[in-house]
Amino acid sequence: MAAAAGGSRGARRPVLLTPGGSGDRTVFLFDRRQEQADPDEKVLSYGKDNYRGFRSAVCQAFGIATDENFVITTTNRKEITEDNFSELVQDGVTLYLLQSVDQMLLSATKERIDFLPHYDTLVKSGMYEYYASEGQNPLPFALAELIDNSLSATSQNTGIRSIQIKLLFDDSHGKPAVAVIDNGRGMTSKQLNNWAVYRLSKFTRQGDFESDHSGYVRPLPVPRSLNSDISYFGVGGKQAVFFVGQSARMISKPADSQDVHELVLSKEDFEKKEKNKEAIYSGYIRNRKPSDSTHITSDDERFLHNLILEERDKESFTAVVITGVQPEHMQYLKNYFHLWTRQLAHIYHYYIHGPKGNETNAVTKDVSPFNNIDIQISMFEKGKVPKIVNLREIKDDMQTLYINTAADSFEFKAHVEGEGIVEGIIRYHPFLYDKETYPDDPCFPSKLNDDDDDDDDCFIVEKGARGKRPIFECFWNGRLIPYTTVEDFDWCAPPKKRGLAPVECYNRISGALFTNDKFQVSTNKLTFMDLELKLKDKNTLFTRIFNGQEQRMKIDREFALWLKDCHEKYDKQIKFTVFKGVTTRTDLPSKRMQSPWTMYAAIEWDGKTYKTGQLVKTVKTLPIFYGSIEKFFLYGDHDGDIYATGGEVQIALEPQALYAEMKTVPISKLDRTVSDKAVKKYIEDEMARLPDKLSVTWPEGDELLPNETRFAGTPIGALRIVILNKKGEAMQKLPGTSHGGSKKLLVELKVILHSPTGNKEIISHISQHGGKWPYWFKKMENLQKLGNYTLKLQVVLNESNADTYAGRPLPSKIFKFTIVEGKPEKFSVGLLELPFRVGVPFNIPLELQDEFGHATQLATDIKPILEASGLTLQYGGITAGTKCIIKGVTAKGCINSCQGKNFNLRVTLPGLKEDTQICKIRLQPGPPRQLKVKPDSEVLKIENGTAFPFQVEVLDESGNITAQPKLIVHCKFLGAANLPVYSVDCSNAGTNILTGPVIHVQNIKKDQILKARIEILSCKDVPPVEKIIKLLPSSHVARLQVLSMDGQKAIQIKHQDEINWVAGDVMHNLIFQMYDEGEREIHITPAVAEKIKVNWTPRINREQLIQGLLPDVKVPTSVKDVRYCLITYLDDHVSLESAFTVRPLPDEPKHIKCKLKGPNTLQMGEELQSEIDIMITDQYGNQVQTVTSACVNSLGVSGPGLDKSNLKITWQESTLTMKVKGIRFKPCLLGSKELCFAWREFSDFLRVNLTAGSPAKLQFVDWPELEKPVAVINGRELQKPLIVQLCDQWGNPCPEPNVKISLTKGNNLKIVPSNQQHKTDENGRANLGVISIHAPRGEHTLQLKASYNKTTLDCPIITLNVLPDPEKPVRLNVKYDKNASFPAGGTFPDFMVSVLSEDDNIIKNINPARISMKMWNTQSSGTRIPIDVTTFSCSKVKDDKEDGFFYFRDKVVPERVGTYSIQFTFAMDKTNMLSSDQIIVEVVPNDPVRLSPDSLPATPAVSNVRALTSRTLVKDLYLHVMDEYNNHTGIDLVGKIIAKIKSPNEDDIEIPQFQGKVSAIEFPFHRGSAEINLVLAENSPGRDSTEYILVFEPDLPALKKPLEPYYLSFMFYNDFKKQQQMATLTKERDQLSHSIGVYRNWFDTTNQLVTEIKCQVKEAETRETHLKNELKKHQIELPQINTLQYVDSLIKQKMLDQEGVMKQPRRTCTLPSYPKGNPDILGKIAHLAQIEDNEAAKVISWHLASDMDCVVTLTTEAARSIFDETQGRQQVLPLDSIYKKTLPDWNRPLPHLRNGRNYFKPIGNPVFARDLLTFPDNVEHCQTVFGMLLGDTIIIDNLDAANHYRKEVVKITHCPTLLTREGDRIRSNGKFGGLQNKAPPMDKLRGMVFGAPMPKLYSTFSGQIDLLQQYRAAVVKLDSVNKDLDLHLQSLNTPEVQKKKQELAEQEKSLKLIEQKLGMTPSDRVTESLLQPIMLDMSDTPIPPKRMRRETVKKLYSSEEWISSPTKKQQQQQQPLQISSSELNGTPRKRKA
């Protein structure tokens, strides 16, 4: 038969084994007995139906010996036996080969399965899918299917039923997924196979299908059918899975299995199989051990590692993981989290809260069995805080709203044909005054919410409170069926005719129906199939449930009465009476609401009647209204009386005399508590307290009478006003009512002037009444305007200033009067017309006034008098009347300024009270009349070329200089051509200087006569003035001329000429000449010479200048310098200059000149990079321009060691120079070199500096030849320091500083110090120091590595021959018998332990105390060593030859079975331990030794009467096979227990018989125990009052040594009465037996206690000696006497030394610590770690600068608390929010290491930054924090090394961030440079740096202090246990102990007497069955015998007695031993001999 494809590895095919010919069944086998077994399956073809043959075939196939012990099991761990072989071993089954049934599965397996869909798939296909209804998204209902499965799976849980839905949407952990996890019973692999079969419902799971329901039994009826039986059809889970996503992974573990079963179904896999034409409905179930996620390799499913890791502590569970989630589903789940979780809370409301639902208003909640259902939903998104909600915490699901808004409920039950039962409940939601309380559903918004304020008009109920929603929601087995609702039933629907309750009451009910499983629902549980049809069937019987009892009565009548009662009891409605018709209200803004409105005259509301005309008051209105009712409005067209909600009332405000106003308000705003009397009193008080009139008095006189006429200015006296009401009472404010708001009253005073243009208010004041002053207005004295006046006093309201109130005017009072003008008493000068000028007439207007300035007239003629000092005034006359004018006034006099002069003009009118007025006038000069010109002479002489000034003045008729606009004086010259015209403006001052351009006549040789005419053209009245001008020729210099004398010949040098002259020469004989205007040579005088300047010399010989000689000109020596020569003459009349340029020319050749372009240094072997230019110059260095290229041949170059092979000399035509290149030197001495250049007879020298060549190699300094390997012992130093020198290729030392030299080595070679990178100093030398070598044995190389200018230098290699250190321990070698078994309580085989050094030799001379053996229980602690580990020391060495071997002999195996770990340790020093590999041992039970019951039964006393209880011997007695240590054993034994009765007297033949008259009964023995129930036969034979013995004989054929029977004595009686008496005696006997046993145990325990204390003394002595030896190793010697005092002083001294070390300055972090009030706060990141290296501390602190202040907490809750306390200012980091999967492995090698080898040789000593951190506390948490913050960040020496490292690493993998010790950073993306990537100095970090750890000396002192303290404690302990031993030895001889011995003897005597009465044989053994030892349960940890004794003693002493102090022991000696009743039931455990 061909084997099926696919083993545990998909690529391999299983091995087909056919040992027995062609069989008819194929079996797949996995051998999992050992880890080394073949992981793949084997296929066995077998034909016989025989287990033995099958087992033999398996042994043959796997090569197993036939006598080897193993089991064959199914994947569900059912063992294959002869009995079940045919049933379990079917074709295609997968089986395991294991050592035992409960063995852990050592590696995963794959089980072939087929899940061909059930035939129902065809029958019912396409009936249902998930679809949206009523606007609801179906996704929550798909999730509900998965919750249904979990509810069913957890239905048998006794504890919490946990269901978790996890939405894993964090893409950093993989693609989106949905996981549903429960802690239910889990599924076996067969059940998981069944789950995959579509349409395999629980009703059809039989036959081949294994199911939890096994034939399905319906659950018992429970309230609301909350039976969790809601996982039904085998459809919903799979439909839901593939509705949500594309793939499902089922992971499950049943409670009784050690294996986890895993199945994956995916759309992609189905499509792949279909494409490959494979069987679609087949696959594999993966069986594995819990928490094994090695098969998860896809990054898309990284989140599964965490989910699978959570399996470790779970007994059973099922997880459904959906991947490939549809994007639209994911968006819905994210965006509508609150909505769909609320829907789930609605669906499972009654499962979560119990049958009564979520009664949040209940005072006390019943304890519900459903409180253990815990459905939690959590959503994880990247970068967001997880959303977590428990459905129990949701308070706004609809069922909660229905339950808590209902006032009453109506419960009923419906019986449908068959067994269908529906429980129902209807709830009533009353109307409360002004609103419905029916809750709103977001899926069915009723739009009835009253969001308006109370002031708005009341709302109108258009529909019922429920709206269009149906009454009943439907629940199936307690779970909501969302798409099915029931509108109503006939008996609860609104009646067609008016019933007992109003029709709107039917819209105030909600309900729920709860069906059992007899009603069919769709497979996806969205709809009922036929619920409503069945419920409305005529045969359906409805009954009411009242007080929990079902009552058969007419349901419709009961419901109507209940509804009527609810309406009357809970609804707060209004009855409208006295119908008045229907109207339309136009006062409403909405036309739709204006009609129809029904009017009523009265209402009945809340027990009161309100009708038209009734006085009422409102509430909740602004303001409060008082008034009488006009009518009531109710919306709608009604007829007659009616009950309704809402409505409005129309109120006429009272008192109506004040308020002619109507108000319409909602009826709900009427004050139902106010009385009519109160309203009436308010109205009367309002009327009486209104203001009525004013009272005016004049306290200060000046009373104003009505219609009085007054002169202007007459005062009106002060006024005092009082406001009086109708009662004559004074008042200041309106009566205090809610209408008027208690407004204050003010009095307003107004004075109104009645003018022709209208009334004008000239005075207005308002007075208010104060506490101490009345209404008052001050005296008015400012009424001076003429006219008719009215004074009005008016009362007004405060704030509004209204003079009316409530439609009536407030009180007022009016006075009318007139004001006229007075007599004239003064005058004023009117406006004068400006300007005032001499001789020009002007007028003076006068204005006459009375006292107050009113215009008036003169009564008589008056002649005015005009006066002004210095002026003569005249006037023509004066006009009389209202306008008085003095006409024709003229003034004449002297004025010194043309701007005018001020005069005081005094005007006097004799006869007036104020008769004189003085006005200031400014009198200006008059118009021009004459012109005055200076000088006065008629003939004026001037020189040609000069201008002549005239002084002109313009005068008026009085001779004053005058001015006026456009006053311009002109002067015109006559007598020659081109003469200038002078003009000057005298408009401002009247005088000016008349001048202009010079008067110049060309070619004048003699005097010439001119005429000047001066006149004002604009003033014809002013006569012109004429003058005669005589013009003389000019005598000033006019021309300058320069000449050069060449012998007697003079050469003229013209202006701007250029003269060429030999460089460095002198120009002599320069002369100059000057001429006047007439070309006459001017004699040079000293004065003239002073005005001559030259620019080529500062010193001028004045004598030579007078002779006409100029200074000599020095020609420049450089041809580049051109000299500009300038001669100037400057006087007051003329400026003359003459200039020429002198250009130098080169002289004859005199020198050569060498110039080096660039540095003068060159390296050995290289050419000079600079060029040398050679130039031929004259004596002044000017380049000679006459040379040609032929001169190159004459140039020679020479120098010591000069290499001329590459010498090149070239001619540069452009510069006329020679260029020399190719200067280099042969190998020679370094230093300064001189080069000589020669041309003709001229030469020049140049010096260059020769240095060493480029660095080419490294050489060791002072080291011999390194050809041979250097021998060094591992861990030791080299013989001398390594010093290297940088050299060029000729061996010259190169002084190149800062060349990086790194020391590279292999990974297995470690050097100290670890700094492997160095730099050369200024001499090119580097000292690598003395290094120590740590490496394995063999040859290793140290390679020096250096580069210069990206060229690798030739570096030497040191070969090291590393020899192993024979004294360094590296591992422990343990030898023992690995095939030995470990029976409980037995002895371990001998363990031989040796310590091996590096050279694999055994290290001898080791203290045995440093080697120990540790043992612990693996099941409770795992592989980690627990705190209470058991430690053994090694045994003494038997033979000296065995030096170096340490034996652990005769160590006792723990007495409790289980898995234990053993590990041997060697203490290398105080802190470092060397551990061996852990040895795992299985402790198995020891040999069976006895039968033992669970608890010791009492001695039975029975009779043979008819009553069954009197005949019962034993009931539910369980007998177990136990080993010597009370471990259950014999689980694999098969046999029986035979119960017999025998008599102690062998001759007795009358033996009682068991029921059925038999003498022996067999009980089956299974898995190590048997259950016993024995009853005597009625009328059984037997002798009365006789003791018989029940004998239980085990028949176990497999045991080599038969077990002893178990004996139980009983008393037999024929008489019932006697049996009762004897039963009492038997009970007394049992009590005595227990008491005697306790006494004996006490004495045994006391002896054990003494022995134990002796052991403690021995241990304390050993401990004291050991610690003393340890102190000697630390050079601490102790004295023999006063040891404790010496130790205390030494500890104190060491602590002082330690404190001194601690106070030494070291780097600390100065950030303030965050207070650790909460244990979940770890502290700030800056305080969690320490770094020793300063450079590393600086750069890491800077790198983490933004995180240093962050506070780390263990929980998000603690982080949130800090966030709230600091208002969000403090950074926080909770550890429980860190995704630990992405954290770096702390032990990961550096990226350049690949498979333990260097991929390249790094430079710069790279090291992970995290490895430089040390953590004082919380190491594990700190590694998490810094692993996340630093990741794989690497520290390296410098930037060059970092760049080199990154460049190499990125060739093979991603390179993390690199930090250099110099402070640079290269980010992980490669970016570096800039200020943001450069660490600042340490002081700039402001103390925000990691601190440095304590020095190592501190640890040394700590170790010494610790040892001293341990030694002190050991000395104290030794003294204490010695005292305890003395006390206990003394206590054994106390009177109390002697008394106990006496009591024991008396009780033994009493026991014998009772046994004689009972007829039992007296025995000294005190009934052995009673004294059989009860072993103490010590399953947690293995306890050696000594510790077991301690535990026994502790149990016999109370907690107070277990005190090892002398005072307590003395108390024990003085008091008798008190034994409690609980101790009487205990027996001591039996010690092994």
Image: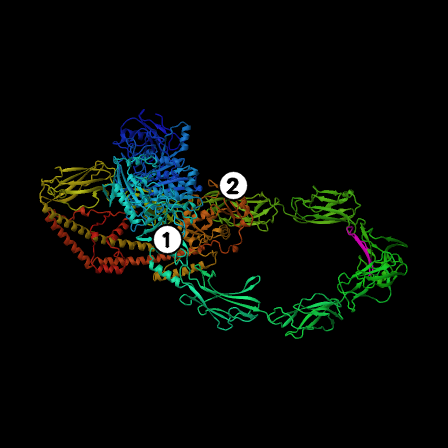
2 vs 1, front mark: 1
Above or below residue 550? Residue 1679 is below
In front here: 579 or 1393? 579
Name the amino acid type tagged 2.
Answer: Val
Q: Is mark 1 on a helix, strand or loop?
A: strand
In front here: 125 or 1425? 125
Look at the image and tell me whether residue 1326 can be seen.
Answer: yes
Left-right relation of 232 to 717:
left
Left-right relation of 449 to 1563:
right
Earlier residue among tags 2 and 1: 1
Estimate how packed mark 2 is, as few (under 14), some (14 to 19) or many (20 or more) residues with alpha carbons within 10 Å.
some
Q: Distance between the residues labelled 2 and 1?
A: 95 Å
In front here: 1235 or 149? 149
Residue bearing the label numbered 1? 630
Left-right relation of 1240 to 196:
right
**Residue 1612 x, y percent position in the rendering:** 11, 44
Q: Which numbered circle lies on residue 1850?
A: 2
**Residue 481 x, y percent position in the rendering:** 33, 38
Specify the segment rendered in magenta.
1114-1135
Q: Is mark 2 on a helix, strand or loop?
A: loop
Above or below residue 1679? Residue 228 is above
In front here: 1653 or 1804? 1804
Picture quadrant where residue 1477 is located: top left
**Residue 1199 x, y percent position in the rendering:** 71, 47
Name the amino acid type tagged 1.
Answer: Glu
